[in-house]
Amino acid sequence: MMPSEALGIAAIEVWPVQLPLHAPFVVASGSMSVAHNIFIRLTLKSGTCGYGEMAPFPDLSGEDQ
């Protein structure tokens, strides 16, 4: 396999999770007691895997799960 081929993306997996917080997260524009996060796993053709997380907060960023 050529080096550039090994860097190609083989798979992207995304799964949403709901994580209850011990105490509400509060800002001036709102609060939340459950974090609606997203976990991501990216696998390259070489077999190398990387993981990431997104933690949107609609009242702060306007983004949601």
Image: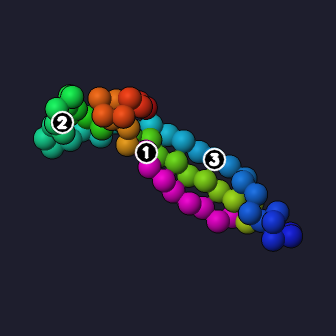
Residue for badge 3: 12
- Rendered residue at 45%/37% (across/down): 16
Q: Position of residue 11 (x, y in %)?
A: 68, 49
Residue for badge 2: 27
How many numbered marks have been drawn onto this rendered protein structure?
3
Q: Residues within 10 Å of mark 2 (few under 14, many from 20)?
A: few
Q: Amino acid at mark 2?
A: Val
Residue for badge 1: 54
Closer-to-camera residue (37/28): 28
- Rendered residue at 15%/43% (across/down): 22
Q: Secondary structure at mark 1?
A: strand
Q: In the figure, is residue 50 to the left or right of 5?
A: left
Q: CA distance from mark 2 to mark 3?
A: 33 Å
Q: CA distance from mark 2 to mark 1?
A: 19 Å
Q: Amino acid at mark 3?
A: Ile
Residue 8 falls in which quadrant of the image? Answer: bottom right
On whether residue 39 falls in the magenta region, the answer is no
Q: Amino acid at mark 1?
A: Met
Q: Position of residue 43 (x, y in %)?
A: 65, 56
Magenta residues, start to end: 47-54
| Disc with the residue nearer the chain's start (1 vs 3) | 3
Q: Position of residue 58 (x, y in %)?
A: 34, 29
Q: CA distance from mark 1 to mark 3?
A: 14 Å
Closer-to-camera residue (65/48): 65
Q: Residues within 10 Å of mark 1 (few under 14, many from 20)?
A: few
Q: Secondary structure at mark 2?
A: strand
| Disc with the residue nearer the chain's start (2 vs 1) | 2
